[in-house]
Image (cartoon, rainbow, N blue to C red):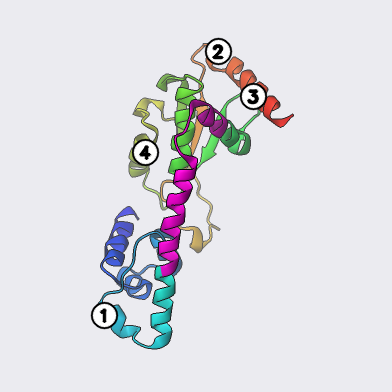
């Protein structure tokens, strides 16, 4: 799937329309829209010929304006945030755990499929919670269309954790999975669990401190 996405990006950068790319790579336009929404687009000669009528040209102009505005507003947003302080990171990671983490059995866990979210949580565990690699374990939850070897390499790169920290992979073998969902999460979801390593300060005591952080924010 990563190879197909790279091909789609190259074709888009070469000025091809969604219709032409979809036909070339046998992909749906919805998939292309998700992959290519931030890729700058200038139609090539073939596309211009196909859309030489006024309605097509108007559509192209609208897409160009939308893309240009999106890029500009994202830049403005990034400048408004500025540099992230340690306290910013503390609050960001805690908010992420409040919303996405497990709070049962006095264990620190988080499950997500977004690489950026995983990277943020890993940074939080290391810099704020002061955990080492041996205090963090991960397990993949994959689908039949996932490649376990490629997915493990992908998550190793995202988390910067060694192979030894991976636990048993779970494969979702449901037969009723919607066709529209196939290929949408090629590397599955990642389950992150904090392991104390027989040091309660890195386990149950850390969990209870974190619940104190939550309490202070929520009151």
Q: Is residue 16 above or below residue 140?
A: below
Q: Magenta region: which residues?
A: 65-93
Q: Earlier in the sequence, mark 4 or mark 2?
A: 4
Magenta residue check for 165: no
Given residues 64 and 200, the one toward you in this image is: 64
Tell me what residue is drawn at x 49 percent, y 33 percent.
Answer: 121
Q: Nearer the viewer, mark 4 or mark 3?
A: 3
Q: Is residue 94 above or below residue 187?
A: above
The residue where tag 3 is placed is 213
Distance CA(mark 3)–CA(mark 1): 58 Å
Tell me what residue is drawn at x 52 percent, y 17 percent.
Answer: 196
The residue where tag 2 is placed is 201
Residue 42 in picture, x, y percent from top left: 31, 70
Q: Secondary structure at mark 4?
A: helix
Residue 188 seen: no
**Majority secondary structure of the magenta segment?**
helix
Q: Nearer the viewer, mark 4 or mark 2?
A: 2
Tell me what residue is drawn at x 25 percent, y 67 percent.
Answer: 14
Distance CA(mark 2)–CA(mark 3): 15 Å
Q: Nearer the viewer, mark 1 or mark 4?
A: 1
Label placed on residue 46: 1
Q: Nearer the viewer, mark 2 or mark 3?
A: 3
* Occupied quadrant, residue 208: top right
Query: Decide: marks 3, 1 in contact (CB < 8 A)?
Result: no
Residue 120 in picture, x, y percent from top left: 47, 35
Query: Decide: marks 4, 2 in contact (CB < 8 A)?
Result: no
Magenta residue check for 72: yes
Residue 190 seen: yes
Q: Earlier in the sequence, mark 1 or mark 4?
A: 1
In the displayed orientation, state which residue is furthest to the right. 219
Label placed on residue 152: 4
Distance CA(mark 4)–CA(mark 3): 33 Å
């Amino acid at each position: 799937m990563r190879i197909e996405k790279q091909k789609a990006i190259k074709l888009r950068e070469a000025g091809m329309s969604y219709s032409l790319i979809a036909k070339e790579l046998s992909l749906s336009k919805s998939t292309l829209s998700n992959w290519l929404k931030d890729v700058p687009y200038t139609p090539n000669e073939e596309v211009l010929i196909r859309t030489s009528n006024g309605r097509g040209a108007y559509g192209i102009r609208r897409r160009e304006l939308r893309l240009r505005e999106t890029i500009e507003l994202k830049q403005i947003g990034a400048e408004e945030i500025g540099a992230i302080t340690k306290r910013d990171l503390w609050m960001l990671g805690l908010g992420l755990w409040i919303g996405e983490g497990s709070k049962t059995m006095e264990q620190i866990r988080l499950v997500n499929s977004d690489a950026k979210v995983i990277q943020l949580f890993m940074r939080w565990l290391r810099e704020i919670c002061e955990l080492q690699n041996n205090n963090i374990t991960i397990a993949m939850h994959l689908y039949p269309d996932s490649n376990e070897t490629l997915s493990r390499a992908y998550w190793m790169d995202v988390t910067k954790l060694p192979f030894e920290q991976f636990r048993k992979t779970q494969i979702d073998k449901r037969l009723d999975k919607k066709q529209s969902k196939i290929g949408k999460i090629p590397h599955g979801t990642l389950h992150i669990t904090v392991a104390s390593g027989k040091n309660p300060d890195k386990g149950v005591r850390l969990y209870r401190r974190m619940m104190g952080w939550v309490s202070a924010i929520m009151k």
